[in-house]
Image (tube, rainbow, N blue to C red):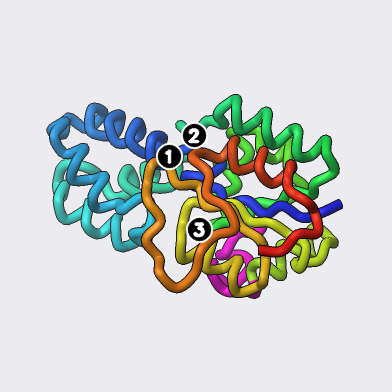
């Protein structure tokens, strides 16, 4: 049973869209200007801004208007409460499992937040398991987190695939452990000159279909 590792945010789920919905609800609930959507999305940087740093930035901007605990609750649950698993992605993942692939989510982030996303979307019922950087003690692209995923699956890395949207974290990480990879472009153009994915797909469903249709022993 070959190993298929999958990124979570903006790969299996549209984290940015979910966060955008949460932002609009947050602003409305606290009587804040709707125009702050653009500022808050920029400050969040697609989830790459550390939680405590974003909390400080929001506290400074909304001092005296929004309680600190409301900001932390928003950051902990906002995106997680709005994430959905697109049907084409669900169908493709179901087909991968039926075809004998062992699917493991590999994601950077905090355990409480990432597990909430996984369970809220039903991904916990589809994949073998998941490895989250907070509990693993390593972040992508560190090889250790991918080795942890292989250990959880009981499968070797040398015949594995990885699907993700981040060039440095996902594709760069796959290169480090000699795994094949699919970069989910989401309309972007590949610009990294020093390495490339095995394949580029326009969306995650297409990426999964490519993997399950590829020769299992082929190398990049």
Using the image as rendered, state which of residue 196 and residue 205 is in the foreground: 196
Residue 33 quadrant: top left
The reply to whether discs 1 and 3 touch (Cβ–Cβ < 8 Å) is no
Q: Secondary structure at mark 3?
A: loop
Q: Which residue is mark 3?
A: 109
Q: Residue 83: which disc?
A: 2
Q: Determine if the magenta segment contains residue 143.
A: yes
Q: Determine if the magenta segment contains residue 91.
A: no
Residue at (55%, 48%) from the top-left corner?
A: 8
The reply to whether discs 2 and 1 touch (Cβ–Cβ < 8 Å) is yes
What is the x, y in percent for residue 43? Answer: 24, 53
**71 left or right of 108 in image:** left
Using the image as rendered, state which of residue 133 and residue 69 is in the foreground: 133
The reply to whether discs 3 and 2 touch (Cβ–Cβ < 8 Å) is no
Up the image or down, 197 lies above or below 16; here it is below
Residue 130 visible? no
Q: Secondary structure at mark 2?
A: loop
Q: Which residue is mark 1?
A: 79
Alpha carbon of mark 2 to alpha carbon of mark 1: how far?
A: 6 Å
Up the image or down, 83 lies above or below 48; here it is above
Residue at (74%, 33%) from the top-left corner?
A: 94
Residue range in magenta is 131-144
């Amino acid at each position: 049973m070959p190993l298929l590792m999958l990124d979570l945010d903006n790969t299996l789920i549209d984290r940015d869209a979910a966060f955008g919905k949460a932002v609009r609800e947050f602003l409305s609930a606290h009587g804040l200007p709707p125009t702050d959507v653009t500022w808050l999305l920029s400050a969040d940087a697609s989830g790459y801004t550390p939680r405590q740093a974003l909390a400080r930035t929001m506290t400074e901007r909304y001092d005296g208007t929004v309680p600190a605990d409301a900001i932390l609750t928003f950051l902990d649950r906002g995106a997680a409460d709005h994430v959905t698993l697109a049907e084409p992605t669900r169908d493709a993942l179901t087909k991968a499992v039926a075809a004998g692939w062992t699917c493991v989510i590999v994601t950077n982030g905090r355990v409480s937040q990432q597990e909430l996303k996984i369970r809220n979307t039903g991904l916990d019922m589809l994949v073998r398991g998941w490895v989250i950087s907070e509990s693993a003690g390593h972040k992508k692209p560190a090889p250790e987190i991918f080795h942890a995923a292989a250990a959880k699956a009981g499968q070797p890395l040398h015949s594995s695939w990885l699907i993700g949207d981040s060039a440095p974290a996902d594709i760069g990480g796959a290169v480090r452990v000699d795994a094949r990879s699919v970069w989910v472009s989401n309309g972007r153009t590949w610009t990294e000159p020093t390495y490339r994915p095995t394949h580029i797909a326009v969306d995650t469903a297409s990426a999964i279909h490519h993997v399950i249709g590829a020769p299992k022993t082929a190398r990049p």
